Amino acid sequence: MKVLLINPPSDNMLTTEVPSIVNEERGANPPLGILYLAAMIKRDSSHKIAVLDSLAEELSHEEIESRIRKNKPDVVGMTVMTFTLIDCMLIPKMIKKIDPSIKIIWGGPHVNIFPDESVSLDYVDYVVLGEGETSIVPLLDSIEKGNGFENVVGIVYKEGKKTVRTKPNTLIMDLDKIPFPARDLTKIKLYSSLLAKRSPITTMITSRGCPYKCTGIIALVCGVIAFSISLGSIHQLVSSMSTITGVAFACSTVLIVAANVRSGTITSEDRKSTRLNSSHIPLSRMP
């Protein structure tokens, strides 16, 4: 089955009153959310996976439509933020006009706040709640086989006129078990940042959750306990970025904060800093 994960454009982004330079020169970061999902699909299934970063490629809706027609996916997935909601609605509408049989999966912060409202839209077939790595492959397998979805954790779907929500997925306690983002599926040299002196840039995630008593979206998606990947995995992650992209990313110091995951808090006794030098991570000048 052909799966396409789309990072939406910013044509209709909901913005605030910020200096114009922020909107004009902000650049684009790798869409790590869908790249983690792509990595899971590559590792744990036989589905063919592709990523379309329409923001980094500065694609218009017409160009996205052309890519959809050329790729002919069976399933399209999108991470939905409230500020990208309009474009995230327009693209599935367009996809369903191209081929109504293409299944649309929504995930991300917005759907965790509004799961029932999201799945009630005619052009949304499934909503994934929480950390999508747990649900994405079982969901795709069920779509392909035409099986029931009641055993796929962490999803919301339509059954006739009824909305069905399966049992919540559990938090991923050991982040080292998640494969590194599939950066090779994007055009890495398109990424830049207003905060960086050189390009291309990239980003990485070394922890999830919140160690405090938060009630915001991070708590909804990743829980109120912080989980981190190991120091060894951070070494491998930075090295893999250079191997995959052919660009040597510079990193001189990383501060590792060890959280007391039992209590869900960080205390002064728990704080530790670890310095990573050139013996751990290759350092070189960015092109």
Image: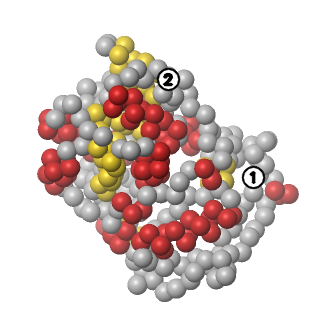
Q: Residue 175 in the image: state x and y as whole percent.
A: 62, 50
Left or right? Give the position of 83 relative to 195.
left
Q: Is residue 121 visible?
A: yes
In the image, which disc is placed on residue 140?
none
In the image, 146: left or right of 211?
A: left
Badge 2 vs badge 1, beta-carbon distance below 8 Å: no
At 34% from the left and 49% from the top, the residue drawn is 49
Give the image location of residue 116, x and y in percent. 41, 24
The quarter holding residue 24 reads bottom left
- Mark 1 lies on a secondary structure that is loop
Give the crowd class for mark 2: few <14, some 14-19, many >=20 residues within 10 Å: few
Query: Is 174 in front, or is 108?
Result: 174
Q: Is residue 31 above or below residue 85?
A: below
Q: Where is 57 relative to 263, above or below?
A: below
Nearest the camera: 243 or 7? Answer: 243
Q: Reading the chain from its start, which is encountered first: label 2 or label 1?
A: 2
Cα–Cα gap, marks 2 and 1: 33 Å
Q: Which residue is mark 2?
A: 151
| Residue closest to the far right | 269
**Kind of residue indicated by mark 2:** Asn
Quarter of the figure with the N terminus: top left
Residue type at mark 1? Ala
Q: Secondary structure at mark 2?
A: loop
Residue 117's place in the image compared with 189, above or below, is above
User: Residue 87 in the image: x percent, y percent?
Assistant: 27, 45
Residue 270 as seen in the image, left or right of residue 69: right
Q: Residues within 10 Å of mark 1 (few under 14, many from 20)?
A: many
Residue drawn 21% across and 58% down?
59
Residue that numbered label 1 is attached to: 259
